[in-house]
Amino acid sequence: MQDDSMTKEEITKHLEETLTVRVVTISPEGKSHVVPLWFVILDGDIYITTTKRTKKAKNILANNNLSLLFDQGEESDMRKLWGIVIEGKAEEEKDETQIKRFYENWGKKYFGQNYLDHPGYQQLSNVPDRLVFKIKQEKIATWDYSKMG
C-alpha cells in the first residue's frame, strides 16, 4: 500500500495556501459543532478569532479540546484530494503584542496590504468581545491522494 501522508514541508505549503479551516468544538452537552473560520499561522502556530457570544467560543471556553480540518480537492478526481486534521487544545491568547500581530497578519491575508482601510476588516475587527485563540497541536493526520499514483 502506498503512503499518502504528507511531509512537514507539504503540510506547511498546504496550510499557507488555504484560506478556510473547519473547526470542530464540543458543547458542554457533548455535541459537536462545526464551523468554517479564517485562520493565521504565526511562528508555526495556528490562531483563530471569534467573539465571546458565539457557540464555538462558548464551547472552547467550556472545553478547549478541538479539531481542525483543512482540505481541498475535487471529488470527481480523487487524485486532487488532500487533507490535514489537527487535534489539539485552544488557549486564549492574552499577550497584546501577539494579538496585534494576529490582526495584522489576518488583515493582510484576507483583506490585502491596505487592510486597515477595507470596510470588511473594519467591521470584523471592531466587533466587541473578540477573542483570539492559539491552537496547541497534539496530533496531526494527513492524506494526499495525488501520491497514490
Image: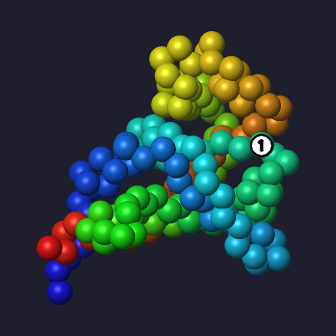
Most foreground residue, 130 or 64: 130
Where is residue 141? Give x, y as percent: 38, 70
Quadrant of residue 142 in the image?
A: bottom left
> Given the current orientation, which residue lies at the most extreme front position?
76
Q: Residues within 10 Å of mark 1 (few under 14, many from 20)?
A: some
Quadrant of residue 17 in the image?
A: top left
Determine which residue is flagged by label 1: 51
Give the image's coloring scheme: rainbow
Where is residue 8? Give x, y as percent: 26, 56
Q: Is residue 98 left or right of residue 73?
A: right
Most foreground residue, 97 or 82: 82
- Residue drawn at the location 54% of the way across and 43% of the way down: 39
- Residue drawn at the location 14% of the way across and 73% of the way down: 149
Image: 143 above or below 35 = below
Image: 122 above or below 141 = above
Q: Is residue 104 left or right of residue 130?
A: left
Image: 72 above or below 41 = below
The amino acid on which the numbered mark 1 sits, given as a three-letter code, is Thr
Q: Is residue 63 left or right of residue 106?
A: right
Secondary-structure class at tag 1: strand
| Residue 5 visible to the viewer | no
Image quarter in which the N terminus is found: bottom left
Where is residue 64? Give x, y as percent: 67, 61
Where is residue 148? Give x, y as percent: 19, 75
Most foreground residue, 138 or 49: 49
- Residue drawn at the location 22% of the way across and 66% of the way down: 146
| Residue 82 visible to the viewer | yes
